Amino acid sequence: MVDNPLWLAIGFLGQACFSLRFLVQWIASERRRESVVPIYFWYFSVGGGVMLLAYAIHRLDPVFIVGQAAGLLVYGRNLYLIWHRRTLPPAD
């Protein structure tokens, strides 16, 4: 099945962003010499997830759609918790 080149590009770009999140996490962990999940991990997750969700919707693939949509909820929640923690005043 041959797809529209634009949609293939969106799908591959989404997959690349989604995959880069692991590289970002690995590099951050190596620098700190401990396992960490940097905020950019979540940004790459959202960016890749949105592109992959768009591609899944284009393909009308319900399994892919549900998987990506559920993941986006988790990524968004993690970013919300990070932002919320950063905006709280310091505890006395």
Image (spheres, rainbow, N blue to C red):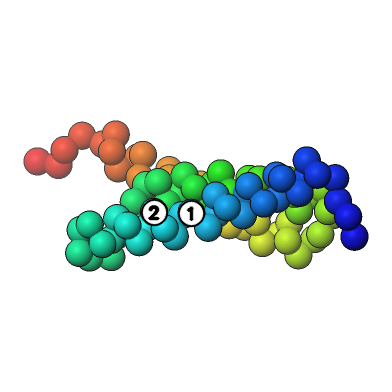
Question: What's the residue at 49%, 47% (across, down)?
Answer: 44
Q: Which amino acid does label 1 sit on?
A: Leu
User: Which quadrant would residue 26 be assigned to in this image?
Assistant: bottom left
Q: Is 38 drawn above or below residue 30 in the view shown?
A: above
Circle 1 sits on which residue? 20
The answer to whether the residue labelled 2 contacts the one labelled 1, judged by CB atoms less than 8 Å apart, is yes
User: Residue 24: which disc?
Assistant: 2
- Identify the secondary structure beneath mark 1: helix
Residue 27 visible within the image: yes
- Identify the secondary structure beneath mark 2: helix
User: Which quadrant would residue 90 be assigned to in this image?
Assistant: top left
Question: What's the residue at 86%, 51% (across, down)?
Answer: 3
User: Residue 9: which disc?
Assistant: none
Task: Give the image location of residue 69, x and y in percent.
Answer: 65, 53
Q: Which amino acid does label 2 sit on?
A: Val
Relative to residue 79, is residue 69 drawn left or right? right
Task: Give the image location of residue 39, x and y in percent.
Answer: 37, 47
> Dividing the image into 4 quarters, which one contains the N terminus?
bottom right
Mark 2 → mark 1, Cα distance in angstroms? 6 Å
Number of other residues with Cα within 10 Å of mark 2, as a class: few under 14, some 14 to 19, many 20 or more: some
